[in-house]
Image (tube, helix red, strand yellow):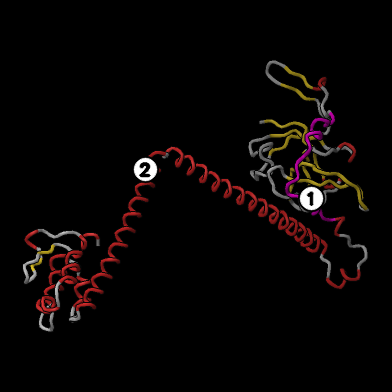
Amino acid sequence: MEEFLKDVSAERAFWFNNGSVIRNIYELSKEINNNDDKIFKYHCNVNHDDFANWIGGALGDIVLSQKLRGIIDKKAYLRIINNRIKHLEKKHISDQKTKALSEKVRALFKDYSHIWILLVIVVATCIITTLIYFEYHSLDNLKALDEKINYIEARNTCFNNYFNDQMIKTRELVNSTAFDIGSQCAFNYSSNYAMPSSIFENTPETVNVDDIILQDDKAIIILNNSHLSIFANTSSMIPAINHNTKALEVTPISASTLHIGDIISYQLDADIIVHRIIDIGFDSDGFYAITKGDNNNVVDPNKVRFSQIKGEVIALIY
């Protein structure tokens, strides 16, 4: 729009019938105002409008040209031209300010580009840190939820095993006063349970040094009630035990020889389970051990009785 206020070339100038020559919109407004109505009507009447034609053709201001079409009153004509000039001037000033501001911003970014880069890095770091924070807490919430689900699953598994093994009818269960879920199930243990290091530091000695004999071609360990064990590929005791591991086991004489942290093998239906003792207790049925695979998320659902225990691992061979 700035070009609408500029001078046109000499060959595109407007010639009044009195000999005056104008080259821009300012001069047109001034000349129309200074001349009498006779000259105005010569150029602008019901038959033609020389001013509007020149404004649209030479200046290129189609908007103003269209507004002037059909206006033959001199005062109204001047008012439209002058209002258009004011609008164009305001637009020109606004464009200049915008351009100046853009130049300042461009110069600011150029002069302080290192600061802006640092600011972007700081903001990005804050955003990433925030995302990690919320993701971490989301993982904590999911872990807590997973622990509750594991608790419920362990409890349900124990219920199902007990009912299937004992074949208890609903009526007999309701009338029975002997049924105690606490004596059968181990479900009050967190999936996040970690064995205290003090347990391993204070593990009693099972094999004396004198019972180990080293020779050039063999090693002999003197053990009573011992047997060799191999393991299935269940991954429940990784990294301590895998399917290539062999173990020496001894048959425990009494429950007093078993300790928290020991790895035992015990009978569960038709299977032999090899897991670590994480707790020991006594209830109305006597001694029991709570076991868990080192690589499992939950403890074993059933309390292990001494009569189920077949061996205690005293040595692992890789």
How many numbered marks does the figure carry? 2
- Residue beneath the point at 86% across and 47% down: 288
Q: Up-down: is 309 above or below 214?
A: below
Q: Residue furthest bottom?
A: 46
Q: Which residues are magenta?
A: 184-204
Across and down, in percent, residue 24 comes to 17, 63
Residue 32 occupies quadrant: bottom left
Q: Name the residue beneath numbered marker 2.
A: 107
Which of label 2 and label 1 is nearer to you? 2
x and y percentages locating residue 225 in the rendered image = 83, 34
Place residue 4 in its image quadrant.
Answer: bottom left
The residue most toward the top is 216
Q: Is residue 96 left or right of residue 230?
A: left
Amino acid type, residue under disc 2 in the picture: Ala
Q: Which residue matches tag 1?
A: 189
Position above or below: 295 against 61: above
- Residue 231 lies, with reference to residue 202, above or below; the image says below
Q: Are marks 2 and 1 in contact (CB under 8 Å)?
A: no
Front-most of residues 38 and 73:
38
Q: Residue at left 78%, top 48%?
A: 267
| Disc 2 residue crowd, few under 14, some 14–19, many 20+, Cα 10 Å | few
Marks 2/1: CA distance?
A: 65 Å
Where residue 53 appears, as percent x and y from the top left, is 13, 72
Q: Quadrant of the N terminus?
A: bottom left
Q: Main secondary structure of the magenta part?
A: loop
Residue 185 on the magenta span = yes
Residue at 91% across, 51% down: 283
Q: Nearer the viewer, residue 253 or 77?
A: 77
Q: Amino acid at mark 1?
A: Tyr
State the image quarter where residue 177 is shown: bottom right
